[in-house]
Each structure stands twice: as structure tokens, then as C-alpha cells.
Amino acid sequence: MGEISKDHTAFGSDHERPPLLPDRHPEPDVFVCDVFDAVPKGDLASMEHPIFSLSTKPDTRLRRYEQGPHFVEVAPSVKGLATVHDRDILIYCISQIISALNEGRQVDRTVRLKAYDLLKATNRMTNGQAYDGLRAALERLRGTTISTNIKTGGTETLDVFGLIERARIVRETRDGRMQEVEIVLSDWVFNAIEAREVLTLHRDYFRLRKPLERRMYELGRKHCGHQATWSIGLDRLKEKCGSNSTLKEFRRLVKTIVTQDLKHHHMPDYAVTLVEREHDVEKVVFTNRRTMKTLGTTATPPPPLPGEVFDAARQIAPGWDVHAIEADWRAWCAEKDLSPHSPGQHFLKFCASWVDRRGEP
């Protein structure tokens, strides 16, 4: 419903629209974080599911995604689900908190910002229409509710939360444009920030025109990371993107993005190709362009773990070699540029996810 599906241009035409939006504010900014790494209690399974809508019209569908015993349910308000573009607000808030943490300043869930700075940093226009759009985005973020069951230490709990807890316009200009905004993040997002479960995003992310391009980049950033390549089946990519298109239409949308990327190299950090593999299964391949910089503030290796952590790990993963799991955990942290705030707890959650995905040894 409203998902971007039109080509708008004929390839090869002299009037073809560039795939990237213009850089409206070329001053450099640094952004960190992928909201799909802002996972409730570090649960890895819920990272597999799309939360934000690709639709350009109000999306009022109730979504439910399942993987094994885990589920994620996303419920919209009457104004629709939060969109991929609404996510820019969260990215901006999280980048501000991470910057403060890196400078040793105290932080909490409340972020106070200037609306103009947010619009500029996320490559948006700064006219009246942009301010109206920002207000609508805050309403959708506040209205979107997520429910998920999370296993922690053998206990299954149900968490229900919003993407943000509250938003308040602190001051408006005489012509009605907001100047300052106060946003209270949910515990879900803030806990992930404190645990440094964040990823760096290329600044051109905010110049991608299509919601599907943004979602594909997010998945490439999360799953490919610093690896040379990562591939995923077309049908599985459709599911992870949260697309409401038919598989045939989704293939056409992806092929358009692939064709544009081959011509313009516009997809940040990763080249995208569509290939056929054995049994006629089509796969989308992300190839690392080696354009990412490693941030030393988030890539510090976790310290050695104490013996009691391994004792707890053996209770969570009976029969498994916990030191082998630790090696995989450290490799995963390095690949994702993670330096967990509480390494022992983070490792135990990784162990729980390991068992959920693999079962008994």
C-alpha cells in the first residue's frame, strides 16, 4: 500500500533522475547506530524482523513476524506505522547520545534538540512542509507499539513498548514552526545505546530516495558488516524488508535498484547485485566497497571474562564448548564494531541466542 514501486524514469534517458537526493547541507556530520541493533535486552532474534514501514501512505496493517519460538508484533496507531524515513529521528537522537557518552558526559532517555539541526543533519529541507512532516513523524513514532517475547535465562517474558515514550514541542516560532523538541526514548532504545549496540551509518544513507534502498542498506550494514560479501535469497530479503509487494513486483523493484547501482554506484558501502544460484534460486549479493571507517571508540575488544561468567554460560548452553562460543562472540563483536557496556551479561545473552538457534549439541 503505497510502497514505492514506480521507476519514474526510463533508464538511458537524458532526463533520468539521479538515484541520490542532492546533498542539501554538505557540512560533514558523523552518525552512529542502526536501530535494528537497538534490540530489547540484546535479543538477537528480534533483529531479524522489520519494524518500519516502506509505505508512502498510512500503513495501518498489524504485522507479526516469527522465527522459531520468538515473535515480534508491530501495531500501528490510526495514523499508521512509523516509516523508514521516520527512523531518521531515532538515528539523530542516538547519535547525539553516543557522542555525549564518548565525551564522558552524563546521559538519560530525554533528548532535547533543535528541529532545524535535525532536519539539516538528516538531509531534509528546512521549509514549513519539512516541519509539518517532522511533527507527523513524531506522532507515528509515538503511536507505533511493539510486542515481543524474549527468552532470558530460561524465562520467557512479554515486552510491550513504543519506539519513543513521549515527544514535546518546547518552543515554536511566531509562524508556527517548531524550534526545540524534547523526545523521551523508550527503555528498549536507551538500553541498547548504553550497551553500545550501535553501528555506523554512511552519511549518504539520508540521500537515498527509496525506502527499499534504505532498508536494503540497513540489512547489508548489519549482516555484511566488514565482510567481503553477504548474500540472501530474494524471497527472504522480501520478508526481512517488510515488503507488501508480490515476489514478482519485489524482484522488479530490487532489479531497478541493482541496475541503478551498477550505473551510478550510489548504494553506500556495498555494491548490490542480483544473481541466480543453483536450483534457479535468485540471491541478492552485497559486496563491501571498503569505504567504511573503523571507529576506535566502538571497536574496543571486550576484556577477559571472569570464571563465574563461564559457569553461568555452561548452565545456559549445556553440552556446548563455552570457550568456542566466546570466540564466536568476540568475532561477532569485532565485525559489528561493538564494545558491550556489560561484557559478561552481553556474552550470556549471546549464549542464550546460540542455544535458541542451534538447540542441543
Image: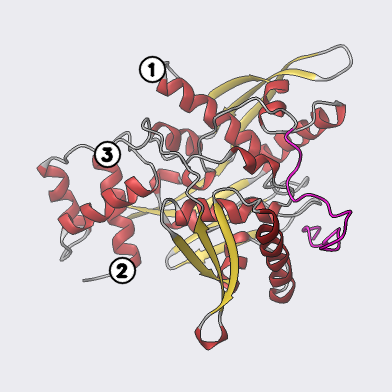
Observer able to see residue 153:
no
Q: x, y (%) of residue 345?
A: 27, 42
Q: Which residue is mark 3?
A: 301
Q: x, y (%) of residue 298?
A: 38, 34
Q: Give the residue type that dot 2 points to.
A: Arg
Cβ atoms at labels 2 and 1 below 8 Å apart:
no
Q: Secondary structure at mark 2?
A: helix
Q: Relative to 162, say whether 227 is above or below.
A: below
Which label belongs to residue 282? none
Q: Residues within 10 Å of mark 2 (few under 14, many from 20)?
A: few
Q: Which residue is mark 2?
A: 358
Q: Which residue is mark 1?
A: 104
In this rendering, would 222 be left or right of 80?
left
Which of pointers 1 and 3 indicates the residue nearer the eye?
3
Residue occupying the point 75% across, 54% down? 55
Q: Relative to 131, say whether 80 is above or below.
A: below
Measured Cα–Cα span from mark 1 to mark 3 = 19 Å
Q: x, y (%) of residue 173?
A: 82, 13
Q: Give the residue type that dot 1 points to.
A: Gly
**Residue 250 covered by magenta stretch:** no
